[in-house]
Amino acid sequence: MQEIIIGANQAGQRLDKFLHKYLPNAGSSFLYKMLRKKNITLNGKKAEGKEILALNDRVQSYFSDETFAKFNGKNSEVADQELACPKISPAENYLIAFKNKDMQHIEVLYEDANVLVLNKPVGILTQKATDKDISLNEWMIGYLLNKGRITEKELELFKPSVVNRLDRNTSGIVLCGISLKGSQSLSGLIKNRTIGKFYRTICVGQIRESQILKGSLTKNELTNKVTVDIKSTGIETAFTPIEILKGNMTYLEVELITGKTHQIRAHLASIRHPLIGDFKYGNEKVNREMNHKYGLKHQLLHAYRMEFPKLEGDLAELSGKVITAPLPKQFVKILEDVK
């Protein structure tokens, strides 16, 4: 018999969803058959799969070691090969990512039992695009392992994850759910658009009044570029000028009311106020000048501030908080020069 005691990061989900994570190589029909035959039980009793797991529940499976290893993803032949030729464990890979010299400028802005808020530098992926990538997500798990906040065993059943994404070359605030409840609650807030998300940028031209832009985005998959239709609806971007700058530019705060790929960049470009450094949507002449003078090779866009509503329950510690991410040094340098 195999038994697992349900912990905080497994509680609150349906038994069948948990079983798919616990036995990833077993199909749904097989799992339900095992439940009917009481080869898988919950607290020693027959279960249907729709039960909501509670803390300290016991899930038992009555398989041979070979069968369990097959469905759990730990085939005995593979295990024997790994003993002969050891591989780096997932936990070790996360710790390597945490210690990677290119990831040392990541800043922890806030941390509690359920949530981690990070300040992502330019040039780092939020989540990896290929198996060889190292991303903020891997760094974050390595950080938790290094602090003893999570164990290698716990990672088999729950992996902390980022819940909002930024482009590689956009810096600033990234939210991470480090518990199941934290992940679910943060995802709900983002889906319901109840978190205020504010960005800072410098754009071409003078913007003297606050505005709200609406429209819709259409993405070209070949060019990874979006176009804005201002006659339609679906996206909303609000912006407020902070300061008119030298060189016909504006220091701008942007509120991302909806959240679509390249929304801020494309929306401002559509009204002829592209972000400086934005080689995809921007002004070629201005970008060349900024690259020559400051080495700016990417859009100057920073997820600067998040404002949380009144909250209870798992996110109560975030209730009413305002979290701010300091501007990157390059952003500060450019801003000081053009004031």
Image: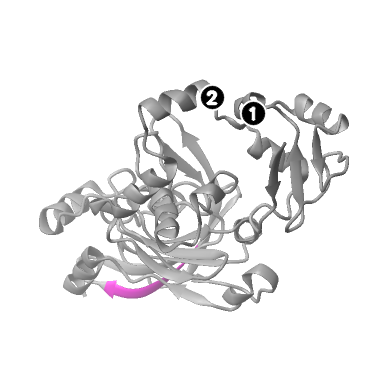
Residue corresponding to mark 1: 65
**Quarter of the image containing the N terminus?**
top right
Which residue is at the far left? 292
How is the protein colored in the picture? one colour
Q: Which mark is residue 339?
A: none
Side (left or right) of 225 relative to 319: left
Q: Which mark is residue 76?
A: 2
- Residue 241: within the magenta? yes
Residue at image coords 63%, 70%? 315
Which residue is at the far top? 77
Q: Nearer the viewer, residue 166 or 182?
A: 182
**Quarter of the image containing the C terminus?**
bottom left
Measured as percent of width and height from the top left, residue 122 is found at 30, 55
Asked if marks 1 and 2 touch (Cβ < 8 Å), the reply is yes
Q: Nearer the viewer, residue 92 or 275?
A: 92
Residue 11 occupies quadrant: bottom right
Whether residue 198 appears in this view of the structure is yes
Question: In the image, what residue type sits under mark 1?
Answer: Asp
Whether residue 230 appears in this view of the structure is no
Question: In the image, what residue type sits under mark 2?
Answer: Ser
Side (left or right) of 175 relative to 83: right
Which structural element holds mark 2? helix
Measured as percent of width and height from the top left, residue 111 is found at 48, 70
Can you say whether 34 is above or below 3 in the image?
A: above
Residue at image coords 55%, 61%? 257
Measured as percent of width and height from the top left, residue 107 is found at 35, 65
Can you say whether 53 is above or below 219 in the image?
A: below
Residue at image coords 39%, 34%? 130
The residues colored magenta run 238-244
The span from disc 1 to disc 2 (Cα, nearest Å) is: 9 Å
Measured as percent of width and height from the top left, residue 261 is found at 47, 46
